[in-house]
Image: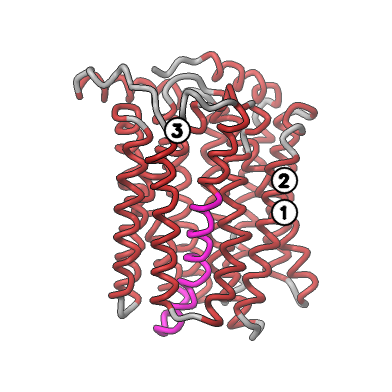
Amino acid sequence: MPAFFSRNKLIISFVILNITMGTAGGIFQMTLPLYALSMRATTGQIGLISGASGLGLLLLVIPAGFLVDHFGSKRLFIVGSIAGAVTAFSLLAARNPAALIALTGCQGLFGSIKMTSLSASFYRSLKSIGIEKAGWFKGSMSIGLTFIGPILGGYLAKSADFPFIIKLLVGLMLIPTLLVYFFHDEQPNQKQAAGVRELVNGQLQGFKSLLRQRSICQALLMEGLAAASISTFITFIVVLVVQNWHLKPTVASTLLTLEGTIFITTAFLCGRFIDRFTTHAVTMASFALSALGFLGLALAGNFVTLVAATVVLGHGLGLVNLITSARIGAVEGDKGKVVGLFAVASGLGLAFGPLVSGLVGQYLGNKAVFMIYVPLFALLGLMVYRSQPAADDSEVEAAAELDCT
């Protein structure tokens, strides 16, 4: 983001921002299902509460991509962060599941502005940071989202009430805003003088060029399915542990932390696999591991199997993250539209993953929410397998030469 940052300082700044934001999100996603259960929400309603955030994200993600390319990442990030903090504070007034659904939907609206701006800034800087660190963005976010956040969430769920948790979350959400405002500079956007009509037409042409790349389209499907997988796991592992296994919420937070640890380790240490093996081979491995992890969660007959399935799932989804992040970083040009496309795929996954899983779980049982992902990963794997393996690497190179400005 700042022009004067060296390569190391630049990546460290993104890591700190993402860890802080992820911690707030991890606490929120850990405690919100428990709060909904205290309101006697059904499995389907819990799925709606979780999915509403993704639906809200979808409504603004493409406009957010336009705005980021036009007004700059810093300004949009600050606006989205402050609006999101106000919305989070409004959760104190919620008295029923319907209110939670509405407010989490608003969280998604402003979250799309915040995440699109930060993502665009990171991927714009990826060439100077290093393509081998493509997975660090989501990896560092996951340090907070699935490691620090769930640990704190499990502790807070046991020792604090929901109003205190919300006030803590608002404070955590404002810390990145202050960091960006005081310590991050941004190069002026030379395209701001362009008219709205020219801006929109240019952006639409960029979207069309991106969608002509088969490699990008496959990565979009992977991004959507991975987002649905992570959101479903975070939401319903809590429900599964508390309702089916009759264990304490801290056990669920331990599983979330374990999955996050494996995901983070994969994101930070396995980037060299993209160079050592073909992208096609890594992709197929990621699908197989993800499907196997969900199968283990659905069929687990003891706690050891549940833990093993969590480890496998974290590794599989970590590999998916590496592949999709590398695809984003390989595309030249303004990153607002690139990130916007992937954010749409992610938003669809975040919205419909928990929603569909919650409805399935309400009628077929909580374990069924994980089983439905096994055939989905198998189908996507079959589609990728039937495509020409050589197209993977060649199309990534073609995408790298594409100027989407």
The single residue placed furthest to the front in the displayed view is 182
Q: Quadrant of residue 292?
A: bottom right
The residue at 54%/82% (across/down) is 159
The residue at 42%/23% (across/down) is 334
- Expressed as whole percent of the image width and height from the top left, the position of residue 46 reads 44, 72
Callout 3 crowding tier (Cα within 10 Å): few <14, some 14–19, many ≥20: many
Q: How many numbered marks have been drawn onto this rendered protein structure?
A: 3
Tag 2's secondary structure? helix
Residue where numbered disc 3 is placed: 120
Callout 1 crowding tier (Cα within 10 Å): few <14, some 14–19, many ≥20: many
On the picture, is 141 further left or further right than 61? right
Residue where numbered disc 1 is placed: 262
Q: CA gap, disc 2 to disc 1?
A: 6 Å
Mark closest to the chain's N terminus, 3 or 2? 3
Q: Quadrant of residue 394?
A: top right
Q: CA gap, disc 3 to disc 2?
A: 23 Å
Callout 2 crowding tier (Cα within 10 Å): few <14, some 14–19, many ≥20: many
Residue where numbered disc 2 is placed: 266
Q: Nearer the viewer, residue 59 or 65?
A: 65
Residue type highlighted by circle 1 = Ile
Span shown in magenta: 19-43
